[in-house]
Amino acid sequence: MLAAAICGSTSIAERRIVETGDVGKRFVSQVAGEWRWVARLRSWVLRRRGEWRRLMDARISILVITLGIMILARPQGLDVVRDLVDSANSYIRDPQGWWTEAAIRSYFRWGCFLAACVWSGLIAWYWPHLLTRARVSREEPAGFRWLRRLLGIGPLLAGTAAVMVTGWEHLRDVWIALCLFAGTTLVLAGFFVRRRALVERRLRLSWWVRPSGRLAPLLRRLGGRHDLSLTLGDEAFVGVTFAMSVAVLVLFSTPVVRTHFAVGVGAASIAFGAVGSVIALASFLLLILFGSRLPVVSVVLLLIVLFSATNDNHAVSPVPSQLVARRPTLDAAFAAWERRTPGGPVILVATAGGASRAAYWTAAVLRAFDDRTGGRFGRQVFAISSVSGGTLAATGYAAWLADQQVDGASCPYDPAARLAFDRAFVGADYLSPAIAGLLYPDLTQSTMPLPVFRDRASSLEEGWSIGWTDAVGQRRTGCAPQAGKLAADFLAIWESSLEAGGPWVPLVLANGTLVEDGKRVITAPIRVEPAVFEDSHDFVDLFGRSVSGATAILNSARFPLISPAATVPTPGGTLHLVDGGYFENGGLETLYDVARHIRATVGRSRPILIIEINNDDDAPGDPHSVDNLARYPNEMDPADSAATSLGVALPEASTLRVAAGVRSVVGALYGTRTSRGVLGAKRLSSLRAVGLTDTYRATFNLGPLLAGRKTAMSWSLSLSSRNAIDAALTRRPPSAAGRSGRPATRSEATVACQRAALNEIARALGADPGAPEAGCPLGSHDAQWVGVPLGLRGAAAQ
C-alpha cells in the first residue's frame, strides 16, 4: 500500500509538472502575488539585469581592493602604517625637530603614501569604465558609475581608517595627515562627479574625447569586435598606467636601487600603490583577451599553479669560502673560548624569533649587559642559539664584536656609539624591501614559466646588508665595523676568533626547520655533530658550501609569506628550508644540547648561566601570559621541582565557525610556534631536574615593557616601541618607584627584576653596575620569572 501510494503520488506529480510546464516559474509567480515586496524586488532585479552584468567589468578592482582591505585589517597590515603614525608623534611633539633630516624623510613618506592612495583610486575608478566602454558603446548605468566612484575613493578611505586605528591614542598628533586625507578624498570625489565638465569645458581638452586611433584598431584585430567606443583619452590612460606599473616593477627588480627606493618611500606607499599596479596590469590583460572569451582569472590562477613547477626563484645563493672544511667541533671551539676567558661562568644565550620586534629586543638586552660591564660581557658569552629576528641581532652582535680591535688592541667600549649603531642597523626599516619584493617581482614571477626575477628573500637579504653598511658609515672612528660584513662569507665572522687567536666572538647557532622532515637545520660556524645536537641537520653539510651572513640570517627567518621557503639543492634532490620557529621559537632546544654537552664533558668545573631572551608581547596581567612566564626559581631542589606544578591557562575561546577546518590547520601551526618555546623554557628552568647542576638561568621578557600594547611581528618596528625598549633596561636610580608615591605595577616590578638580574650578572663578571635595583622583592613571582637571585656572586673568582 505504501509503495502504491508513493507511485500514485509520483504519477500525480509528474502529471502536474507536464501540465504546468514550469513549476518553478509558477511557484515564483504565486509567491510574488502573495507578497508584493517580492514582486517589486524581482522586477527591480530584472530591470537592472544589464547593470549586474556590468559588475563583471569592475571585478578586478572589487577583488583587489577587498583583498587589500582584508590584509590591512590584520595587525601585520596595520603595521605598514604604524611607523608613519609614530614618526608624526615624535616630530609634532618636538617643534625643534620639525626640519631635521629624519623629519623631512617622514614628510616625504607621508606624501608618497597619499600619492599612492590617489594613484590606486584613479586606476580602480577608471579601468572598469574603460573595460565596459571596450565591450559596449552605450552609456554606463548610474548605479555602475557610483560603484566606480566608491572604488575610486576606497584606497583613501582605507588609508584614513588605518591612520585613525594605529594613531587612536594620539589623534591630535596626526590631525594634519587626517585633514590632508579627508580633503584629498573630497577633491577626488568631486573630480569623479564633475570629470566631464572639467575635462571638456574648463580644460578644453577636446582631444581627450576624439576616437582612439591605435588602441581600438588593435583590440579589434585581437578580438574581432566592431562596437568599441574608446577615445584618445582612454588610450593615454592605458599607456600611462601600464608604463608606470612596468617602470615600478623594473625599479623594484634592480639590485641596490630597489632597497634604497623602497626604504625611501616606505612600506605603506608600496603596499597601497601595488593595489593600483595590480589592477592596471590585470585589467590590461583582461582588455586584450576580451575577444577570446576565456575565463581570464581562472586561466591565470591555473597557470600560476602549473608554472610553480618550473619557475622556482628561491634557491639559496652560495659564496666562495675556504673555511667550510676548517670548521671546528664544539669541543675545539670551547677550548678556544676557555683559553681567552680563564675565569667566570659559561654564558649561553637563547633568543626567540619575532622579526624586528625580537631583533631590537635582543640587541637591547645584549647592549644592556655590555653597558654594565664595559663591553666585557660579549667575550664571556660562548654561544647564542637564535631563531628568526633573534638571529638578525645575534649575527649583527657577533659581527660587531669581531671588528672591535685595531692593530691587535681592543677598542674602548663606547655606550653612545653602540646605541647609535643598534638603532641604525637593527632598528632600520626592512619591511619596505620585503613588501616591494613580494608585491612586484615575486608576484610577477608567479605568472611566468621560467625564473626571471630575483625573489623577495634576496630583497630582504640585500636590505640587511645595506642596513649594516649604512650603520657602519655613521661611525667615523677606527673602531667602526667593516662595511659589507653581512654580504661576505658568514664563516669569516669567526675566522680570527677560532683560528687566529683573536678576541672571542660568541658562536651563533641559527635555527631553521627542514620542510621534508620537520627537524632542525642549524647554520653555525662549527660542525653540527649528532653526538651534541640530537636529531638535527647541519646546513653547511646539506648545502655543501657557505653562504653570506645575510643568507645565514634568513635561513632562520623564513616565515611565510614575507620570507619564502628556501630551495636547497643537494646531491639527492631538492630540500626546502623554513623559519626555525616552526620547530621551536625560543632556540632553547639547541641551547640545551650545548649546555648538556658542556656539563657532561668539556666544562664540568665552571658554572653555566643560561640567558633566555623572550619575545612574548603579552602583558603580565594576562593569566595566559602569567602561566607562559612561569619558571622554576634558581637553586630549587630537584625534589621540590618534581613536586611543583607550573599551571597552564586556557586561552580565549573562539566563537568564529567560518572556515574552521582551514583556520585550525594554520592556527595550530602558529600556536605551536610559541607553545613549544614555552615548554622548552619551563623544562630548562628546572635545571637540576634535567641534569644541569651548578647551572643558573635568567629570563628577559619583552611583554612588560610594552605594557600590553600589541606590536605586529614584521620587519619594521614602530618608533614608540623602539624608544620604550631602549629606555627600559637603562640603569635607574635607587628607589625610583618609591618616589612616585604609588606602588609599582606588575609590569614595573617585572622590568625592575630584569634590571636587577642585569646588575647581578655584571657583578659576577667583576663589574660595578652601581646601587642595587629597587622594586624587585626576592621570592616574589616577578623575581622567580626573571630568575633573581642567580647565585653567581662567586663565579668571577672561579
Image (cartoon, helix red, strand yellow):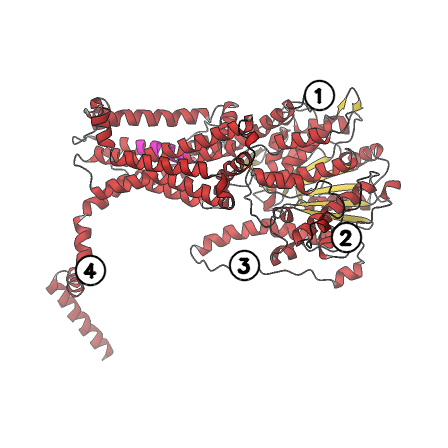
Q: From the image, tell me which residue sits under label 2.
A: 687
Q: Quadrant of residue 549?
A: top right
Task: Left or right? Give the position of 641 relative to 565.
Answer: right
Q: Quadrant of residue 493?
A: top right
Label 4 residue SS: helix
The rendered magenta stretch, by its main secondary structure, is classed as helix
Q: Of the two numbered discs 1 and 3 on the same chain, state the one appearing first in sequence.
A: 1
Q: Which residues are magenta?
A: 273-284
Q: How many marks?
A: 4
Q: Of the two numbered discs 4 and 2 on the same chain, state the one appearing first in sequence.
A: 4
Judged by depth in the image, the label closer to the viewer, 1 or 3, is: 1
Q: Quadrant of the N terminus?
A: bottom left
Label 2 residue SS: loop
* Residue 261 spot, x, y in % from top left: 49, 26
The label on residue 652 is 3
Q: Of the two numbered discs 4 and 1 on the same chain, state the one appearing first in sequence.
A: 4
Task: Left or right? Give the position of 602 relative to 300.
Answer: right
